[in-house]
Structures are given as C-alpha cells and as structure tokens.
Amino acid sequence: MKKQQINALTATRGFAALLIVIFHFGLERFPINAMQPFFTKGNIAVSYFFVLSGFIMCWTYQDRLTSYSDYIKRRVARIVPLYWFALAAYVSFFIWQHFHHALVLDADFRIAALLNIVFLQSYFPHYALLVNGPGWSLSVEMLFYLTFPFFLAIYNKHLRWFYVITITVFALSQVAHIYFVLHDNGSNDNWHNFIYYHPLWHINEFLFGMMGCHWFDVLKQRHQWLFPFLLFALITVIIMYAPPVFHNGLMAPLVLLFIIAVAVKQPRILGWKPLVFLGEISYGIYILQFPVYAYWEKLSDKLFGDLNTNTFFYSYVIVLIAVSAICYSVIEQPLRRKINALGKK
C-alpha cells in the first residue's frame, strides 16, 4: 500500500531549492543582501535534501520494497528524465555559443558532459561542477539509490547495527571533513571539489535521514510533539554565526530533528496547496536553475534591454518557477508514469 505524502515536508523542499538559487545568483540582491550571513551558507540546503532523501525513502519503502529492479526503475523514473533534459538544454546553450560566439568547448567540457550523463561527475573532482553544476548532487543521490536496499535490509533486520554503522560513518565523515577543510588553502580546486562534492563524504547524511525514520515512528506513536519553528530558528542562528564546516552533514542531527518535527506536527501553513506545489516542482527549480539563467539572460536582454540587477534576478526566479511547473507537467509526471508502467502486464 502506497503511503500518503507528507505535504508539510514536501513544502520545505521548495524553500530549500529557492535557498540554493539565492546562494548561486541572488546574494547581492536587495533585500537578500541584508541577510548575507545566512544566505552565503545557503548551500547547506543541499545537505538538507540529502537528509530528507534518506528519511523519505526509508519511510516510503521500509515495509514495501519488493524487487531491486522495480525499485531502480522507479528511482530512474523519478530523477533521470528531467536531469537529462536540463543537461541537454545547458549543453545545447554552450554549443550555440560555440557556433555563434566562438566559445571554445575543450576536451574537459566533452568529458564532463559524458560523466554527467551517467551520473559519475562527482567521483572526478576536476569535472564535478563543469556543465550543469547542481547536477553533482544527483551524482551523489544516485549512490544513495543504488545502496539504499542494502542499508534498508540492515535497518529492517538489525536496527541496532544500523545505528552503529550510521553513527560510525557520521563521526568518521565529520572528522575527515573538518581535517580536510582546515588543511585546504584554496589553491587547488580539485582538492576543494573532492572535500565538498565526492559522494562518499555525503552518505552519512543519507544514513542519518534513514535513522530519523525510526525516531519519527517512535515520537508519532508516543504523541510527543516537537516545535519545528523553534528548531528552524535555532538552525538559522547556527548557520549565520558558526564556521562554514556544515556542508558535509555536521548539522544532520539538528536538521533531522527539524524534519521529524515537521512530519509529526505538520504545521497547517506548510500544507497550503501553493507551497506544496512549490515543493513538488522543487526538483525542477534546483536542476534547471543554471540552464534557465543562461537562456533568460540572453532572452531578457533582447526583450527588455539592460535590466537592473534586482529586476533581472526576480524576473529570473519567476521564469524559473514557471519553467519548472511546465516541466513538471509535461516531462516529470508523464515520463515517470510511462517508465513505471514498463514491464507491467
């Protein structure tokens, strides 16, 4: 039996995706620039997605994972169509620039494009962010998807051992990450990319999310209520004033408490349909942000001339949301249904 979607958590995905868009393109825009200590660490929202992914997948599949092939088919249906569409759109933009504006597409670009197609770019630091940069996290997610059934089997049959594995992986990951950050002098981009984007350094976040599924079941059964908005305020303050070492999951325990609090309490405001829909199209907002920015920059210049930076950014956000909504309706949902239906009689 398919479990009902937790709408409040779906809504939070929309905010997380927009936070990453602001981190990439809007830090200097008014009034965002008044909260720069928070928004300059907006990439932590990617960690939020990783923890949330572990939580949602465990909650969804813990008692209904059947065959590995059917599970992989559903995961492919969930992320691949729009991912490939975004990649194709961005590569097409560069090819157009190559032929019309003499942009040089070197061997690195071609290799990176091929690695992106098969979700392997994050394993090779030099290519992790080339082409469609946000795609690095989908390379990480693909590792989560491939290994999830193995971890779920341990979770279902040996919960204590799952806790031991998760806490051990988390502790080792944080010690290694902090050590690497302290010894990163910023002179080597490949070293930086290895520290922040290699999939192995993020598996701890996914496992922590899975562990939170057990906490959620316990708290829900005992009717113990947490306070999501107080937790969110605490996370905000920590992000603003703490050193930038959270990108690889150091805040996972606190983030997970927030996720559980939202799932248990389900604040009414986060169940508002427009916010839930924003969460449903959040994947598009995230993966299409670079292609849409590139095309809108050219198109807006032709349509409106030289827009001021604030007008351009907010018009870009509106266009990005609109394009994501369209892609959700004409690409994500239809292709997901068709792929899921493959092999069924």
Image: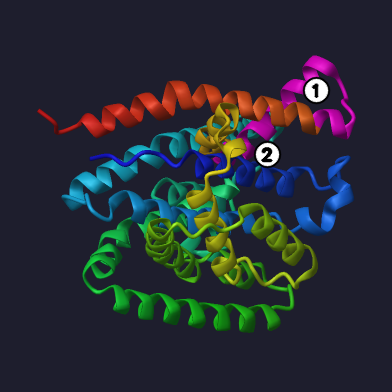
| Tag 1 secondary structure | helix
Identity of the residue drawn at 31% across and 62% down: 147
SS majority, magenta: helix
User: Magenta stretch: residue 200 in it?
Assistant: no
Count residues near mark 2 (Cα–Cα under 10 Å), then give few for <14, some for 14-19, many for 20+.
Answer: few
Residue linked to disc 1: 301
Q: Which numbered disc, 1 or 2, marks the residue that appears first in the sequence?
A: 2
Pick the residue in front: 224 or 132: 224
- Total of numbered circles in the picture? 2
Above or below residue 311? Residue 79 is below
**Percent from the top left, x then y, of residue 290?**
63, 39
Which stretch is magenta? 286-312
Residue linked to disc 2: 103
**Percent from the top left, x then y, of residue 69?**
19, 48
Give the amino acid type for the residue marked by disc 1 in the picture.
Answer: Asp
Pick the residue in front: 228 or 59: 228
Count residues near mark 1 (Cα–Cα under 10 Å), then give few for <14, some for 14-19, many for 20+.
Answer: few
- Which quarter of the rendered picture does the N terminus lie within? top left
Please tell me in which quadrant of the rendered image residue 267 appears: top right
**Percent from the top left, x then y, of residue 286?**
58, 41
Identity of the residue drawn at 41% across and 61% down: 222
Cα–Cα gap, marks 1 and 2: 19 Å
- Which quarter of the rendered picture does the C terminus lie within? top left
Above or below residue 334? Residue 148 is below
**Percent from the top left, x then y, of residue 170?**
48, 76
Looking at the image, what colour scheme do you see? rainbow
Above or below residue 280? Residue 108 is below
Identity of the residue drawn at 63% across and 38% down: 289
